[in-house]
Image: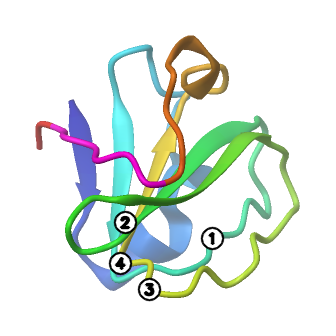
Amino acid sequence: KVIKANNFFSKLFGLIIRKKLNDKEGFLIENCSSIHTFWMRYSIDVIFLDKKNSVLAIYNNFKPFRVTPFIRNAYYALELKPGTIEKTSLEVGDLVQFEA
């Protein structure tokens, strides 16, 4: 299940003010080409997608107090529990489907 960031504050604060995600949850940020993990207390997995849900970049176990590079053509950032991506065979170029 995907939790959508649907306003300025949910995009700005994201998972900073949320509990850790469980195995079947994701946090989706629209119109996003880079994320930060400032003030977070835990690592996350991050997938950047274009408007057609094609994977552009993957970050496994992205640690707190970091910023990803700008991902060209990214429209979505999907944040997941750390270790989620390792359990899949997800690669750049794959298409991702999710339930909002």
Say whether disc 2 or disc 4 marks the residue closer to the N-terminus.
Answer: 2
Residue at image position (84%, 45%) is 63
| Quadrant assignment for the C terminus | top left
Secondary structure of the residue carrying tag 4 is loop
Closer-to-camera residue (92/84):
92
Give the tally of numbered discs. 4
**Figure quadrant of residue 37:** bottom right
Alpha-carbon span between mark 2 and mark 4:
8 Å
**For the residues carrying marks 2 and 4, which lies nearer the camera in this image?**
4
Say whether disc 1 or disc 3 marks the residue closer to the N-terminus.
Answer: 1
Residue designated by label 2: 29
Closer-to-camera residue (9/93):
93
Q: Is residue 94 magenta?
A: yes
Q: Are marks 2 and 1 in contact (CB under 8 Å)?
A: yes
Secondary structure of the residue carrying tag 3 is loop
**For the residues carrying marks 2 and 3, which lies nearer the camera in this image?**
3
Residue at image position (50%, 18%) is 88
Alpha-carbon span between mark 4 and mark 3:
6 Å
Point out which mark residue 35 bears. Answer: 1
Alpha-carbon span between mark 4 and mark 1:
12 Å
Alpha-carbon span between mark 1 and mark 3:
14 Å
Point out which mark residue 73 bears. Answer: 3
Residue at image position (63%, 70%) is 35
Q: Which range is magenta?
A: 93-98
Secondary structure of the residue carrying tag 2 is strand
Q: Is residue 63 above or below residue 70?
A: above
Q: Is residue 8 left or right of residue 82?
A: left
Q: Are marks 1 and 3 in contact (CB under 8 Å)?
A: no
Q: Residues within 10 Å of mark 4 (few under 14, many from 20)?
A: many
Q: Are marks 2 and 4 in contact (CB under 8 Å)?
A: no
